[in-house]
Amino acid sequence: MHDHAGHEHGHSPIDIHAHFYPKAFLDLVGDNAAAYGIEWKMVEGRGPQFRNGHVVTGPVGRKFVDLSARIEAMDAQGVAVHALSLSQPMIYWAKPDLAQALAESFNDSIADAHEQYPTRMLGLATLPMHCPELAIREARRAARLPGVRGFYMSTHVNDMEVSDPSLFPIYACLEEIGLPLFLHPVQVIGHDRLSAHYLTNLLGNPFESAIAAAHFIFGGVLDQFPALRVVLPHSGGAFPWLVWRLQRGYVVREDLKKIKHGPEAYLRRFWYDTVGYSDHVIDYLKTVIGIDRIMMGSDYCFPIAYEQPVKIVTDHPRLSPLEKQAIVETNARLLLGLDGGQ
């Protein structure tokens, strides 16, 4: 078993935005998806492909499924650790019994990946968020699985925003467990206007993060669960820039003053990955929010992903060596509770 990679200056970079389709999960989807209107197929030589409504994902290549191929790719990037997470089509389309089975299958698979490569693979557990009682039960089960260091949900759950009261018992459970909650878009807003020019991804995904962050703030989630730590993908999407517009709304509108602080005060309740495609994005996050809230990510291994996520950070001309180390490893170790801490 190959379970070691040499890394520059002894660092062990952690990629916190790395997607994974376990074969057992794909098989379970394949056996059941057609009844739900989800198309799934394995494109010969090119990996799995999904269609869920207007969203087409893939084919994504064998590196998504094959752990040995993933390790080779990680070694070529100088990445020590992947925090494995599900992507499209997630599991909220499924009825409760199937959703539970899908969640268990994925979460057991990331635990298996960790046991196969204990120093290389960690997991972000998937939960059937549309079935709160099942989600709570699976959260408690998954938190005990080897290698699970966080939870993963989309920026909305079917027709529910992240501030929907039915989700609050799940947040209470996750806060009690003490592991962070990672967000990711699934089906984006305005897809009918974003279908051309790849805009569902280029614009839709970052807009989704902004919408979810606004609901977490104005919907009182962050006030009610002060220890809940939330990670936004794609460098926070549009949120870190538009937070000042949210702040202006809070200042001038009485109906927005139900929260404990103005939206800008919640910037540091979120963590952000480096998938912003410019040194200037990292500069902005560092200046406005703080270097300790930025973690390396790649969006592995979609076409838009960083090919060299470590180099993106280490080549940054305005970061100190200590700041680079914080982004590629230290901040993620702290957030994920590695080294024995939470």
Image (cartoon, rainbow, N blue to C red):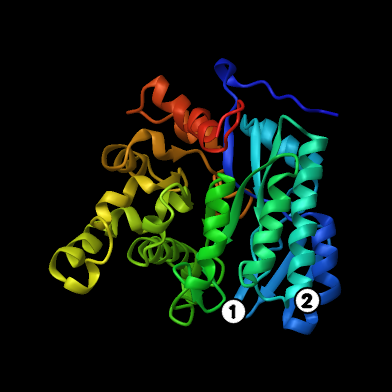
Q: Are marks 2 and 1 in contact (CB under 8 Å)?
A: no
Look at the image and tell me whether residue 181 can be seen: no
Residue 128 figure quarter: bottom right
Look at the image and tell me whether residue 19 can be seen: yes
Can you give x and y, in whole percent of width and height, for residue 53 in the image? 63, 80
Q: Report the side of 205 relative to 147 (left or right).
A: left
Amino acid at pointer 1? His
Q: Report the side of 248 relative to 63 (left or right).
A: left
Can you give x and y, in whole percent of width and height, for residue 122 in the image? 68, 40
Q: Report the side of 19 relative to 113 (left or right).
A: left
Question: Which residue is under mark 2?
Answer: 33
Can you give x and y, in whole percent of width and height, for residue 292 in the image? 39, 34
Can you give x and y, in whole percent of width and height, for residue 208 in the image? 44, 66
- Position of residue 102 relative to residue 194, above or below, is above
Amino acid at pointer 2? Ala
Q: 84 or 204: nearer the eye?
A: 84
Q: 295 or 192: nearer the eye?
A: 295
| Cα gap from disc 2 to disc 1, whole angstroms | 15 Å
Question: Which residue is under mark 1?
Answer: 54
Q: Nearer the viewer, mark 2 or mark 1?
A: 2
First along the sequence among labels 2 and 1: 2
Q: Secondary structure at mark 2?
A: helix
Q: Quadrant of the N terminus?
A: top right
Q: What residue sits 22% from the left and 74% below the top?
A: 255
Mark 1 is surrounded, within 10 Å at the Cα level, by few (under 14), some (14 to 19) or many (20 or more) other residues, namely few
Residue 187 figure quarter: bottom right
